[in-house]
Amino acid sequence: MDRDGTLILDKNYLSHVEDIEYFPDTLKALEIFQDLGFELFVVTNQSGVGRGYFSLESVYVIHRQLQNDLREFKLQPFKDFAICPHGPDDKCQCRKPSGQMIQDLIAKYHISPKHSYMLGDKLIDAQSGQNAGIQGILVRHQQQSEFPFFKTLLDFAHHLKSRP
């Protein structure tokens, strides 16, 4: 899943731990995903690194805090993080909507694409899932597209839970 705008509020180039703010439904949704047997990964563009706003180490510090927060709430930490530190003009192969970061995680962890989802608040998140061969899902911000939309992560978690 995407990080900023999906798991936590998008603070526009988040670089300080004290600025992390979860959506009210995030932790409960993650608990349901884990109860359903999903392994959780974060796939995030962090162009603030490429633009020189903050260091890659700042991104790692934020991610360590996310892991600690999950442990504090008795949840399994994220299995892994895939980060594109490049700016939009760098024309890299990993930046969403490319599916490269997701494909790399699928290969590394032997994940079944058939039973996987890419959740995000932007069209490029859902497109990156599609480009990697998995289902893209939009949450929080509806955009005209062919992708399924859910108002919150928790709505999507309940949708998965209610399926036979």
Image (spheres, rainbow, N blue to C red):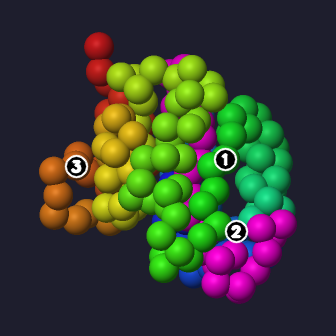
Q: Dot 2 corresponds to which residue?
A: 20
Q: Nearer the viewer, residue 108 or 119?
A: 108
Check whether the beta carbons of the residues at disc 1 and disc 3 lie within 8 A of each other: no
The mark tally for this picture is 3
Residue 99 % position (x, y): 43, 47
Q: Earlier in the sequence, mark 2 or mark 3?
A: 2
Q: Nearer the viewer, residue 57 or 70?
A: 57
With respect to residue 104, does 57 lie above or below?
Answer: below
Q: Quadrant of residue 76?
A: top right
Q: Residue at x 36, y 29 (%)?
A: 160
Which range is magenta?
33-58
Element at badge 1?
A: strand
Mark 3 neighbour class, 10 Å CA radius: few under 14, some 14 to 19, many 20 or more: some
User: Which residue type carries mark 2?
Assistant: Ile
For the residues carrying marks 1 and 3, which lies nearer the camera in this image? 1
Frontmost of labels 1 and 2 is: 1
Please determine whether, in this image, residue 117 is positioned above or below residue 21: above
Residue annotated with mark 3: 147
* Amino acid carrying mark 1 in the image: Phe
Q: Is residue 33 left or right of residue 123?
A: right
The residue labelled by disc 1 is: 81
C-alpha gap between disc 1 and disc 3: 23 Å
Q: Compare residues 161 and 92 and report the one nearer the observer.
A: 92
